[in-house]
Amino acid sequence: MSSATLINLSYIVASVLFILGLKMLGRQATARRGNLVSAVGMLIAVVVTLLDKQVVNFTWIVTGLVIGTVAGVICARVVKMTSMPEMVALLNGFGGLASLLVGWAEYGKIRAFGWERYLAEFAGSPVFTGTVIFLAVLIGGVTFTGSVYAFAKLAGLVSGKPVLFRGQHLVNGLLLVLTAAGGGVAIFAGDPTWVLAGFTTYLVVSLVLGWTFVMPIGGGDMPVVISFLNSLSGLAACAAGFVITNNVLIVAGCLVGTSGVILSAIMCKAMNRSLTNVLFSGFGSGVVPGGAEAGGEGAIQGELKPISPEDTFAVLEAARQVVIIPGYGMAVSQAQHQVRELADLLEQNGAEVRFAIHPVAGRMPGHMNVLLAEASVPYEQLVEMDAINPMMPTMDVAIVIGANDVVNPAAARDKSSPIYGMPIINAHEARTVICLKRGKGTGFSGIENQLFLLPNTRMLYGDAKAALQGVVGEFKSIAAA
């Protein structure tokens, strides 16, 4: 068996493991095993690639391996679960940067050998080769700078609100046209000077385009943005795979790209919005004429009614059906373990406890699922939005922990609200609603939550972790007595 055949067979095995691992990630019970299966597939792909006779110098490879291993271990050990959204955004960016560098390196070969010799030794068609290099650099550049900006927003380094200016879409459109023009010059120009000018143009403009692409997207849409950028990183890898004619990179890039698009579409459906609306509407800019904040038609009128941990305990002690609705506030306070402890105490007291998970709760896809899994909350207790809503009127208490838009009744009744039409978890239909919140400000998206004003809602102010510890302490003191 030739080495080329063995390499391609190994790539097929790695690709099958990628697909099986991706399927296993769909269920909590098999997610860890799926992650391991995918990692084994990637290990096979990397080892086989390094054994290819084309690799003649391992100095930089070993150097990169050491640096990457150290960085990975530090990230795994140091980065908190609350920082996972920005960590995922940053990793997406590095994936795009890697593809950009592959395209750049291939362009370096063209400059060194000239098109004629390059095509004779490395490729067959100048149009196809130039196009995939262009796509690897374009998508990789947009993914890199866009992900860095998303990271800055999620980490609080810049404002999470969208940055809008007059003619923004026109500017982005012109940048895209300029990028395409640079790509055309780089592909079809015969003169080396023009080829260099074209390549430099679309390289620089693609980096600028990624930044301006994420600027007008508000913090409330970050889960969709992260998923979409993840998809772009996969497409960039796929293009890089065509550049260097590596089959397993093409397959892996397609898997990441398509799964990211599917996930983005699922989350957009959960918000009753299109992907183009999410990416280009500037949601959360605060420019909402006649909105709920101004008392628009359908807006709920009322006042915030605080409740103490002691009174919260009294309400929960008598409850028999309880639903817990987590949001990003739970992640910020790292209260998932206290949530699990409270749920256990409620069950010991005779209550049935469920966790209602909205598809876009938190700041990245599956954010709440990850946090609750870390706290060992049984997967069977997690209920999706469509399944919990019919049961909501039977709930004695709904506990909302740091969630905002995903439980805001303005989405159903206030046509002037920017989230009108977005499917929500109907927490307001429970007999009593207890909302844990740090203060009286708006959520990350900048929209007032009208749930807080309803007569059956009580506000438990303060850090969610400390507030829950107070309620848990009341349960334990009664048990001890």
Image (tube, rainbow, N blue to C red):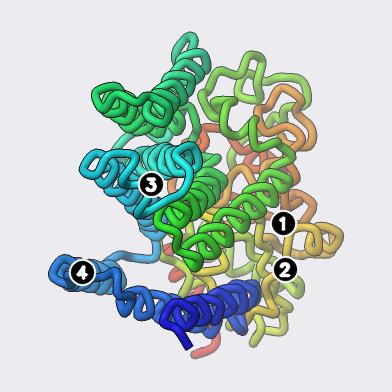
Tell me where residue 474 appears, x and y as whole percent. 50, 75
The residue at 68%/27% (across/down) is: 417
**Residue 328 seen in the current view:** no
- Kindly check if marks 1 and 3 are in contact, taking CB atoms under 8 A apart as contact: no
Mark 2 vs mark 1, CA separation in Å: 19 Å
Q: Which residue is mark 4?
A: 61
**Residue 143 against residue 50 in the figure, above or below:** above
Q: Which residue is mark 1?
A: 432
The residue at 57%/51% (across/down) is: 403
Tell me where residue 96 appears, x and y as whole percent. 39, 49
User: What amino acid type should be assigned to the residue bearing mark 1?
Assistant: Thr
Crowd rating for badge 3 (residues with CA inside 10 Å; few <14, some 14–19, many 20+): some
Tell me where residue 232 appears, x and y as whole percent. 50, 47
Q: Earlier in the sequence, mark 4 or mark 3?
A: 4
**Residue 416 seen in the current view:** yes
Q: Which residue is mark 3?
A: 119
Q: Quadrant of residue 65?
A: bottom left
Q: Earlier in the sequence, mark 1 or mark 3?
A: 3
